Amino acid sequence: MKNRPFRPPLSGQKKRTPFRRPGEHNLPRPEGRRSREAGNRSLSPSEAMSLLTSEDFHGYSDRPFAKEMVDRLRKRQTEDLSTEKLQKALADAGVGSRREMERLIEAGHVTVNGATAKLGDRVTAEDILRIDGRQIRREATGTPRVLMYHKVAGEIVSRDDPEGRPTVFARLPRLSQGRWIAVGRLDFNTEGLLLFTTSGELANRLMHPRYEIEREYAVRVIGELDAEAMLKLQQGVELEDGPAKFDLLQDEGGTGTNHWYRVRIREGRNREVRRMFEAVGVTVSRLIRVRYGAVSLPKSLPRGKRMELTPEEVRAWIAELDAIEKRIAPTAKAKAEAAKTRKEEARAKARAEGRTARGSEKAEAPRRAKDGRFRDASDRTGVPVHEARDLSDRPTQRKRERR
């Protein structure tokens, strides 16, 4: 390697050298945070300048901005902005239902601005929500999406099924964020209109009993209802979870053993329509939901297909729900208490009937005699034990001979 001739730097040009400047190795090493706090020694101006200009200096704080100032700003914003319950905000974001969110909050999976949330916390639109570290994207308040789906028999309204049966959620379009929430459910063998929305709050309002959203069904039964059974279904029948009645029961005719009826009800209990017909001794062979509130099953929607409501239609329905809520507000609490009382009475009655049935079965069971044998029981010959010799302890196999 040839030695290059030395060329002095031009005027105004900095000197380039791979070596350190004289005396740089003698500068004091920057102290760690713990050692500074432990020593509590003030630095001289030259030492402080050397510390700041050192390449090993990485700052004193983990946050680039004063946390106290941020907290004060958040507090002022919280006082000015409207708040809502944490589980409601998560449900509106399409993460899940309110009950599912409440379970996640109680389990400690949810954080608000980095702090673990607890049930009862309220949040604003500016708060950052995370579930297991994943930030929840919350869109600005707008019109939620509502989807109509024509369910076919043989599909379940669930995302996961251990038996691997087809699910209605496989027929829905994918969302970039959030998820579709089913407004109520339909049985495995029930067909017809099923609604989905991206808003947990709207789904809750459409399903809550206090709004008394009408559900209309086309019912095919085996046989035909007589006048007494029809009157009983309109006046009310007793079910395991309380009384139930149809607001409308209309005969639609039929041929052969099958007969069609159109019914209207304001509740959505599990298998309620089927159980009401069973209470009068009639079996439902086919059940189709044709209307849910303001939405009717359109003729142009084939089975297994979907159709979306326009934003204007959704806003009109939400406005109608707001008007209903204002109208029922004065009596909502009393109605809720009355419904709760009816359910408790029905459950108590069902438990009492169950105890009575178990007692009658116990009374009809064979009685045990003093010798420990059951009265009226028989051995393998069919002869009652107390009338013949008991051969139940007789060995049925010969003992094997040892070889």
Image (cartoon, rainbow, N blue to C red):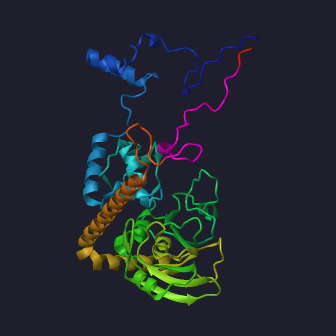
Residue sitting nearer the eye, 221 or 332: 221
Horizontal and vertical percent position of residue 310: 53, 77
Whether residue 64 is situated above or below residue 321 in the rendered picture: above
Q: Main secondary structure of the magenta part?
A: loop
Whether residue 402 is situated above or below residue 241 in the rendered picture: above
**Residue 54 appears in which quarter of the rendering?**
top left
Horizontal and vertical percent position of residue 296: 53, 81
Residue sitting nearer the eye, 71 or 286: 286
In which quadrant of the rendered image does the N terminus lie?
A: top right
Residue 342 falls within the magenta-colored stretch: no
Q: Is residue 179 visible?
A: yes
Name the residue rendered at 38%, 13% in the picture.
28
Residue 387 falls within the magenta-colored stretch: yes
In which quadrant of the rendered image does the C terminus lie?
A: top right
Q: Residue furthest right?
A: 1
Whether residue 111 is situated above or below residue 319 in the rendered picture: above
Name the residue rendered at 62%, 52% in the picture.
163
Q: Which residues are magenta?
A: 377-400
Horizontal and vertical percent position of residue 284: 55, 74
Q: Is residue 190 left or right of residue 65?
A: right
Residue sitting nearer the eye, 282 or 174: 282
The number of callouts visible is 0
Name the residue rendered at 37%, 17% in the picture.
31
Q: Is residue 403 left or right of residue 320?
A: right
Horizontal and vertical percent position of residue 78: 28, 55
Whether residue 315 is situated above or below residue 86 in the rendered picture: below
**Residue 320 appears in which quarter of the rendering?**
bottom left
Q: Is residue 382 left or right of residue 373?
A: right
